[in-house]
Image (cartoon, helix red, strand yellow):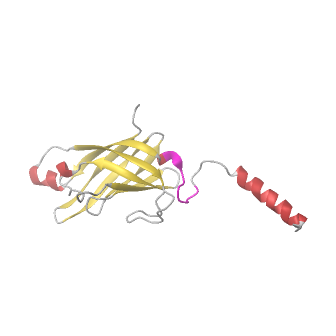
């Protein structure tokens, strides 16, 4: 079978063009930008929560960690404003500030998306309707605000910083 010469030239040009696009910039597709991938330590500063309103305790810090991998499967996630680019698991105990416990036997999961340049959205699932994080990626840290819509006891919110662990 003979392939027409014009088709061969066009195919070679297309392949060269695609090869030139080999940068690591996020393209908006599943499994995109690798900058979120890996382990992170977390500090959640609590500004308001049901527990703080109940007993005037001093503001608390919740510490934890999370691990993210590039998403190549999940096309949507509740409370994210677009398809998740990453997902994984987290460990953080928000009971001290009055948030509900995750269901027994369930691994607490996180879905995340890098939304354009350096904006990050995450949802920590397993605690009621989830803890929503919105922040900015800057080198090896992500900083921003978190919120929990709550239930009958009320919601909670504050600020957070995620950092790459020091080795």
Q: Is residue 60 above or below residue 17?
A: above
| Label total for image | 0
Tell which residue pokes out farthest to the front in this image. 1
Give the percent coordinates (x, y) of residue 100: 20, 58
- Magenta span includes 30: yes
Assess whether residue 28 is covered by the magenta stretch. yes
x then y, percent, for residue 109: 35, 55
Q: Where are the magenta residues, as a range?
A: 27-35
Whether 140 is drawn above or below 117: the answer is above
Horizontal and vertical percent for residue 65? 34, 44
33 left or right of 77? Answer: right
Residue shown at 37% from the left, 64% from the top: 79
Drawn side of residue 4 relative to residue 98, left or right: right
Q: Residue at x 16, y 56 (%)?
A: 50
Residue at (21, 56) in percent of width and height: 101
Horizontal side, residue 67 vs residue 23: left or right: left
Type of secondary structure dominating the magenta stretch: loop
Between 59 and 44, the one lying in front of the other is 44
Residue reaching furthest to the top: 167
Name the image quarter holding the C terminus. Answer: top left
User: In the shown orientation, is residue 72 left or right of residue 149?
Assistant: right
Quadrant where the image shows the N terminus: bottom right
Q: Position of residue 92 (x, y in %)?
A: 28, 47
């Amino acid at each position: 079978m003979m392939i027409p010469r014009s088709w061969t030239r066009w195919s070679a040009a297309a392949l060269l063009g695609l090869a030139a696009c080999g940068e690591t910039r996020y393209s908006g597709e599943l499994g995109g930008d690798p900058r979120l991938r890996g382990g992170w330590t977390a500090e959640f500063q609590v500004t308001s929560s049901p527990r703080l309103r109940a007993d005037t305790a001093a503001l608390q810090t919740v510490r934890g960690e999370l691990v993210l991998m590039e998403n190549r499967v999940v096309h949507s996630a509740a409370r994210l404003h677009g398809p998740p680019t990453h997902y994984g698991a987290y460990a953080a105990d928000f009971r001290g500030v009055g948030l509900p416990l995750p269901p027994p036997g369930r691994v607490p999961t996180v879905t995340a998306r890098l939304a354009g340049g350096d904006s990050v959205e995450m949802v920590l699932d397993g605690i009621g309707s989830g803890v929503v994080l919105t922040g900015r990626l800057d080198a090896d840290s992500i900083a921003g605000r978190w919120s929990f819509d709550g239930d009958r006891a009320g919601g909670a919110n504050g600020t957070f910083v995620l950092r790459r662990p020091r080795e």
